[in-house]
Image (tube, rainbow, N blue to C red):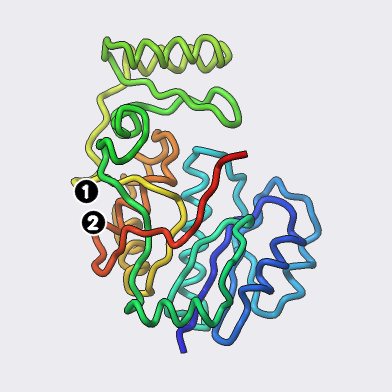
Amino acid sequence: MIRICYIMLAHSNLNNVAQIIKLLSGDGVGFIVHIDKKCVENTHPLCSIPEVELSNDRYDVKWGDVSMVDAVVSLIRQALSDKRRFDYFIFLSGQCVPVKPAAYIQEYLKSHGMANFISASPIPSVECGWLEGGRRRLECYAVRLSERDIATIEPRRLDFGNFRQLCKTATRGNISALLHALNIFLFAPKRKPLNNLRPFGGEFWWRMNRASLETVLSYYDANPEIRQQMKVTSNPDEIIFNTLAFNLCGNTANNLLTFVNWGG
């Protein structure tokens, strides 16, 4: 039997999260859940489920920010040290809904050799589908304009893309954001490559076997400069785990195993 740990990021609707957990529950299945620091809901619906452990740390998670990475790294660390000794780890949001039962998922992973499943495209590339093929995420600095809006500013580059981002900052951000963007444009150093790793980008969510996840965490801990790079990167959650998995881990499939629909 494969022992599966679901690690989850939840920020609201904890009653719904508890229902999702009950649908995924089964023999050898456990859950570790991070509840956003901003959430003030009663945690009883989760704490009343024996298989659930809450995250030791609670972060104020912001969209497109390194706090997303910090929360997940904390979850990974806790999951790997859990006395239940899980074999496989599946990362979900609090809004993911299972369309297959726990037994099917266990059998699927077993029949596919405990492969890692994570989406990834090289950066920069057309396949990535991001602005300028994702180049701006690696070579520019992120400037937060609002809760769900970020501009990317590249030092001393005179082109339409940079001009557009500076105009975006001027029209959508406040004076502090504009001054920060101008300071980056005029004085910030050029960004360095991502620790000699080939960069990949894709969806935030993933499924990984124990050996691979241990390798990813060990490398991340041994190279603190990676977090410093992610701290100034726009939406680093869609880069860091994808990059580490495809550079460091074998038996990794470019497949999310998740149906995602952003329409409406």
Q: Which residue is drawn at 78% across and 50% down?
A: 40
Among the 4 quarters of the image, the one containing residue 208: bottom left
Farthest bottom residue in view = 1
How dense is the environment of label 1, judged by Cα within 10 Å: few (below 14), some, or many (20 and up)? few
Instruction: State the image coordinates of residue 115 (x, y, percent, origin top left).
Output: 33, 72
Count of all numbered marks drawn on residues in the image: 2
Mark 1 sits on what residue? Answer: 197
How dense is the environment of label 2, judged by Cα within 10 Å: few (below 14), some, or many (20 and up)? some
Instruction: State the image coordinates of residue 163 (x, y, percent, origin top left).
Output: 36, 10
**Residue nearest the observer in this picture, 118 or 153:** 118
Instruction: State the image coordinates of residue 231 (x, y, percent, origin top left).
Output: 42, 38
Side of 225 relative to 21 (left or right): left
Are the residues flagged by discs 1 and 2 in contact, CB closer than 8 Å?
yes
Instruction: State the image coordinates of residue 116 (x, y, percent, origin top left).
Output: 35, 67
Q: Name the quadrant of the C terminus.
A: top right
The amino acid on which the numbered mark 2 sits, given as a three-letter code, is Asn
**Residue nearest the observer in this picture, 156 or 249:** 249
186 to 97, vertically: above or below: above
Mark 2 sits on what residue? Answer: 247
Q: Which mark is residue 85?
A: none
Side of 143 relative to 174 (left or right): left
Compute the Cα span from label 1 to label 2: 7 Å
Q: Residue at x 49, y 15 (%)?
A: 169
Q: Which residue is drawn at 38% across and 47% down?
A: 202
Q: Residue at x 67, y 49 (%)?
A: 37
224 to 256, vertically: above or below: above
